[in-house]
């Protein structure tokens, strides 16, 4: 019987603003969480970790201010680990080269590159996060598939039934649009994203900013989805990214018939990393 520790590995997606982690046992995603970027000295400490438990204690967020966890309870998981399990392999995908370089010191690291994602027709500067999410979505729901990633940037990425890249689009995400208005103007305030769709015609500045960004963005997303279904009537649409739930809430208020046909999944990139890693064995 194979030892459990031989199948444990970590996936790390280095995003534009955060680190996204997943712990796998074999092909099963056990736990996923997000953290801020780690300083170089902390990564150096990780490279010297002697056990899996030691490493996870260093990188798992201790409170909501430093990260958010999904899939179960990490404390319960840590209790199941033996103190002698060695530090696991870490498979890294990244859209931030300076951060990628820091992880080269980890002794058991593998960096995924774009050419290891089996989507056909990709162009050299396509973000690997987009490619992995697309591959993960297609493997789960089938091709053709359009992925809408509601992160720092909002991206659309599609592939046809032959797993060939159709293309996509990139624009500033919900939070980035509001932050840019506050940073690049003299009097507009910092505004948070509301949980529910705001009034369209606002009577104060904060709600006017929310309305302008959200209604315009939601209308644009609807247009992209409808264009996708005209080209691929049986095509799937999957929403992912940190603002996915807010985005779906907004769409639900305006276009519930569209939301009924969407799939929502937080861990598309990890599914893509798992599949790409298995292909490289």
Image (cartoon, helix red, strand yellow):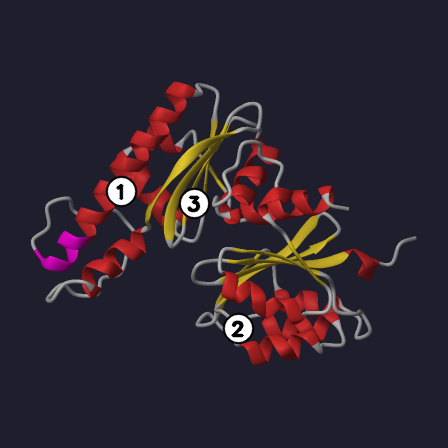
Q: Quadrant of residue 254?
A: top left
Mark 3 surroundings: few (<14), some (14-19) or many (≥20) residues within 10 A: many
Mark 2 surroundings: few (<14), some (14-19) or many (≥20) residues within 10 A: few
* In-image side of 112 versus 133 (left or right): right
In the rendering, at what x and y percent does residue 124 appear?
Answer: 51, 43
Q: Which residue is mark 2?
A: 38
Check residue 149 in the rendering and tell me which mark sits there, or answer none.
3
* Residue 159 on the magenta span: no
In the rendering, at what x and y percent does residue 281 appear?
Answer: 77, 46
Check residue 94 in the rendering and tell me which mark sits there, or answer none.
none
Count numbered badges in the picture: 3
In the rendering, at what x and y percent does residue 96 appear?
Answer: 49, 60
**Element class at badge 3:** strand
Q: Which residue is mark 1?
A: 217
**Element class at badge 2:** loop
* In-image side of 83 versus 15 (left or right): right
Distance CA(mark 2)–CA(mark 3): 24 Å
Distance CA(mark 1)–CA(mark 2): 32 Å
Taking the spot 64% from the left edge, 67% from the top edge, the residue there is 104
Distance CA(mark 3)–CA(mark 1): 13 Å
Taking the spot 24% from the left edge, 59% from the top edge, the residue there is 180
Q: Which residues are magenta?
A: 204-209
């Amino acid at each position: 019987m194979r030892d459990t520790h031989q199948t444990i590995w970590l996936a790390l997606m280095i995003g534009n603003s955060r680190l996204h982690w997943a712990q796998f046992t074999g092909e099963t995603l056990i736990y996923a969480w997000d953290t801020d970027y780690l300083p170089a000295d902390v990564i150096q400490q990780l490279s010297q970790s002697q056990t899996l438990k030691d490493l996870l204690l260093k990188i798992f967020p201790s409170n909501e201010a430093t990260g958010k966890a999904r899939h179960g309870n990490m404390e319960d998981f840590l209790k199941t680990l033996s103190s002698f399990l060695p530090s696991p392999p870490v498979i890294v995908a990244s859209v931030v080269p300076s951060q990628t370089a820091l992880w080269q010191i980890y002794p058991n690291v593998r960096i995924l590159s774009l050419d290891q994602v089996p989507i056909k027709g990709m162009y050299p500067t396509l973000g690997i996060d987009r490619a992995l999410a697309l591959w993960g979505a297609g493997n789960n729901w089938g091709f053709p598939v359009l992925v809408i990633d509601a992160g720092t940037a909002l991206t659309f990425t599609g592939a046809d039934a032959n797993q060939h890249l159709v293309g996509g689009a990139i624009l500033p995400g919900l939070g980035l649009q509001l932050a840019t208005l506050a940073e690049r103007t003299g009097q507009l305030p910092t505004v948070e994203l509301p949980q529910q769709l705001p009034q369209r015609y606002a009577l104060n500045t904060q709600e006017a900013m929310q309305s302008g960004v959200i209604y315009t963005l939601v209308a644009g997303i609807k247009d992209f989805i409808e264009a996708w279904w005209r080209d691929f009537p049986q095509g799937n649409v999957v929403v992912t990214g940190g603002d996915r739930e807010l985005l779906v809430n907004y769409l639900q208020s305006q276009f519930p018939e569209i939301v009924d046909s969407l799939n929502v999944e937080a861990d598309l990139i990890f599914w893509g990393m798992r599949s790409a890693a298995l292909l490289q064995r």
